[in-house]
Image: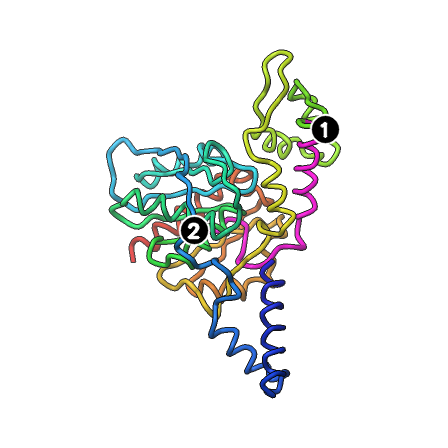
Amino acid sequence: MYRLVQLTFVKHLHQTAVATQINPWNLGWVAANARSSSTYLGDSLSTNIETVKLSYDRHQPATPSNKSPLIFLHGLFGSKLNNRTVAKQLVEILNRDVYCLDLRNFGQSPHINRLDYPSLAADVEKFIDDAEFVEKPILIGHSMGAKTAMALALRRPELPRFIVSVDNAPVDLSNNNIGVYSKYVRQLIKALDNQQFTSIKDVDLELLKVEPTKEIRQFLLTNINRGRKDEKCTLKIPLKLIGDSITAGNIAAWPYDHNISRWSKGPALFIRGTESNYVPDEVIPDIGNYFPSFELRDVKAGHWLISENPKDFIETLVDFIEKHEDI
């Protein structure tokens, strides 16, 4: 989506150049004019986006602490329950509050007819504003949640102390795994709306046709209300809306421009799975363009890094926080 909008804007500049007899192939002129205006980014940086009140779990240490709280943001099809186990461990290790949020349209948070990174970030910004933390929070996001944390840092640079991106980068991933997620949506709609299954086992068998990995199917099934005997299973989430957002490219997109906004107020940690293709070496320069004070750490895992290797994830995160909080 971002690339399409950017190309449309450049085409507009080209037409303007022709009309005003400016050499349309003067790339410096085009780039300078692109940087001088953020209008082609739509409302990506707007602070007037409609927000919803997010559901969350708060995990607290035995002794109250005013240290920077951690805020976990889950990925696509996830919820605040995904990070509950590591959150409880981090409470003890780092002696501070840890919040796990349900992002809009997921878990127990409200459903609303918009799902993209500006709106996802706006909800989290409202959550932080309302919380009035003593110290700025540390944002930790996985996949979709990672891009939400990055978007927040660009939109409201003063809010986070650190950001941590788990297996995602500030780039457009339209060519990466969109088809897989769309298949999940289609199979769940088929199972719940068309077939109207009453057994979660039947829903699982439908998912098996497109996803052989049992752990991923079990993760997807957390979005299903298991019906009582002879009652059909139902969805907890607005699946059609989510599917439309995936198809439109909103989840894969990155609707920002480092020539207009970058975050240099604090360090950023990027943790990538060595067996994942979400953060290849080629995108490392893109990370630096948006987050010049970044560190990159590898953890032996696939895309579902936190659940696949929680021990190394926790060690990596704690090392980063303790190192930078002492500065």
Query: Among all residues in the image, which is located at the extreme front?
Result: 19
List the residue tagged with mark 2: 49
Residue 279 sits inside the magenta stretch: no
For residue 45, the mark is none
Q: Quadrant of residue 169?
A: bottom right
Q: Quadrant of the C terminus?
A: bottom left
**Amino acid under disc 1:** Glu
Residue 165 sits inside the magenta stretch: yes
Name above or below for residue 247 compared with residue 107: below
Badge nearest the viewer, 2 or 1: 2
Name above or below for residue 28 compared with residue 3: below
Secondary structure beneath disc 1? helix
**Amino acid under disc 2:** Ile
Q: Quadrant of the N terminus?
A: bottom right
Q: CA distance from mark 2 to mark 1?
A: 37 Å
Q: Quadrant of residue 285?
A: bottom right
Earlier-in-chain disc, 2 versus 1: 2
x%, y% of residue 172?
59, 58
Query: Among all residues in the image, which is located at the extreme right?
Result: 209
Secondary structure beneath disc 2? loop
x%, y% of residue 195?
72, 24
| Mark 2 touches mark 1? (CB < 8 Å) | no
Q: Residue at x 62, y 67 (%)?
A: 8
For residue 206, the mark is 1
Q: Residue at x 48, y 58 (%)?
A: 44
Q: What color scheme is it?
A: rainbow
Magenta stretch, residue numbers:
164-191
